[in-house]
Image (cartoon, rainbow, N blue to C red):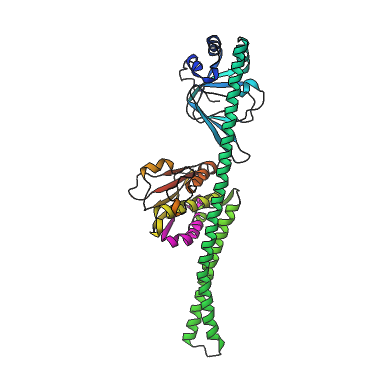
């Protein structure tokens, strides 16, 4: 635990009186707790205790605040609750010697009153029967509320996760349809070129300069069309396979981003959206040990969002996609459009699940929520909207070159 000894401690007795947890305690009991308990100072974003640890201490928040986080079977931690001044946490330790059921992280510089089990038992011994019943009734209510809160959060998280997965599959299905449609063009060209060659070679004739030129032109058309079809299939394979696995791999991040952009162009061109990709990474910066599928999903969702909201109803426009380094430690992926922009009143809600202004255009309100979840939880990065643009908007995804384990 990290302390800040230079900070001045504040009085705990008034906050003990304000706390609903200690509502049934007498003034004598509160004074005993205030005098005997120790003050702990913890900096922002530091762990107070971890899920699974053993401890016999509960805490009263004197100033600052904490997040209660719970582990979810391989899906990382999620926030169950946020607590602030005069609220308590870790109270289960007073009744049980079981490991901690959650991880607690400070949300800002904080001061706590640390109350251990022995102190609480001494205070409870000072109480009469009615007071003891009141104390345990309060603890029981706190536990019931915490369990209910955790269940609701877990249910909401699982529901959102399943809907996000459905949205990812929908995007992949749309991509399949787009590729299937697009690949018809080079196949049609190949068919035509083969027909021309078959006609020219069906009847034995002298090879004139013109016939040789026609055959050469047909062969060149076939070569270019096969190359185009091969590239479409290869890009689709790389992007689609990466969506189905969730493993770190070493790959060229600039090349992977460009593959996704090229594949998205197949569907975006129906809405007359043109995408310009620019890679500004030096050769040694391109190799990234990360998640190809996550990178692709972020780009797919941002570009789909641009088509749907920046350039609705097929009005079309330009999009600039850029990948570069902000410094030696972080990548920056930018998706910039010049379309309608986002109204000021909607800005605070753009990453909320199910919030959308394009329901009539097929929007589910999950596109940016998925992006935010992937960036912050998987890539341990940050996504921000540049507010200084006169037209359109730009999403900047900042994430580390070396992902934490």
In magenta stretch: residue 279: yes
Does residue 330 lie above or below 218 as drawn?
above
Towards the viewer: 170 or 5 = 170
Going 62% across and 20% down the picture, which residue do you hit?
94
Q: Position of residue 388 (x, y in %)?
A: 35, 44
Residue furthest toward the right? 97
Does residue 186 lie above or below 266 as drawn?
below
Q: Which residue range is magenta in the image? A: 257-286
In magenta stretch: residue 281: yes
Does residue 48 lie above or below 221 as drawn?
above
Magenta part, dominant SS: helix
Towards the viewer: 284 or 280 = 280
Residue 244 in the figure: left or right of residue 86: right
> How many numbered discs sit on the rendered protein?
0
Instruction: Name the image quarter holding the N terminus.
Output: top right
Towards the viewer: 134 or 117 = 134
Going 51% across and 67% down the picture, which residue do you hit?
228
Q: Position of residue 386 (x, y in %)?
A: 39, 45
């Amino acid at each position: 635990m990290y302390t800040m000894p230079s900070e001045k401690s504040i009085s705990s007795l008034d906050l003990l009186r304000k706390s609903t947890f200690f509502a049934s305690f007498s003034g004598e009991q509160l004074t005993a707790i205030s005098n005997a308990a120790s003050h702990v100072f913890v900096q922002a974003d530091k762990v107070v205790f971890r899920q699974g640890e053993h401890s016999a201490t509960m805490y009263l928040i004197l100033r600052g605040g904490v997040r209660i986080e719970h582990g979810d079977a391989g899906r990382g931690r999620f926030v169950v609750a946020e607590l602030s001044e005069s609220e308590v946490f870790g109270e289960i330790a007073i009744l049980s010697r079981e490991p901690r059921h959650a991880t607690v992280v400070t949300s800002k510089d904080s001061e706590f009153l640390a109350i251990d089990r022995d102190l609480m038992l001494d205070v409870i011994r000072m109480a009469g029967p009615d007071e003891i019943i009141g104390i345990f009734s309060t603890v029981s209510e706190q536990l019931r509320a915490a369990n209910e809160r955790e269940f609701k959060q877990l249910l909401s998280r699982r529901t959102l996760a399943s809907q996000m997965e459905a949205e990812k599959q929908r995007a992949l299905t749309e991509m399949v349809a787009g590729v299937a449609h697009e690949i018809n063009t080079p196949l049609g060209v190949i068919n035509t070129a083969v027909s021309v060659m078959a006609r020219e070679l069906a009847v034995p004739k002298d090879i004139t300069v013109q016939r040789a030129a026609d055959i050469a032109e047909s062969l060149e058309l076939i070569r270019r069309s096969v190359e185009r079809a091969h590239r479409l299939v290869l890009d689709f394979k790389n992007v689609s396979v990466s969506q189905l696995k969730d493993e770190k791999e070493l790959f060229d991040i600039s090349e992977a981003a460009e593959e996704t952009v090229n594949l998205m162009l197949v569907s975006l061109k129906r809405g007359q959206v043109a995408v310009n990709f620019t890679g500004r990474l030096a050769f040694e910066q391109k190799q990234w040990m990360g998640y190809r599928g996550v990178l692709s999903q972020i780009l797919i969702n941002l570009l789909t969002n641009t088509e749907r909201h920046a350039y609705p109803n097929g009005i079309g426009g330009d999009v600039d996609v850029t990948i570069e380094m902000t410094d030696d430690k972080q990548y920056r992926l930018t998706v910039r459009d010049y379309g309608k922009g986002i109204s000021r009143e909607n800005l605070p809600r753009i990453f909320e699940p199910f919030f959308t202004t394009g329901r009539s255009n097929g929007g589910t309100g999950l596109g940016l929520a998925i992006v935010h979840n992937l960036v912050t939880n998987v890539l341990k990065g940050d996504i921000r909207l540049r507010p200084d643009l006169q037209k359109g908007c730009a999403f900047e995804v900042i994430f580390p070159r070396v992902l934490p384990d």
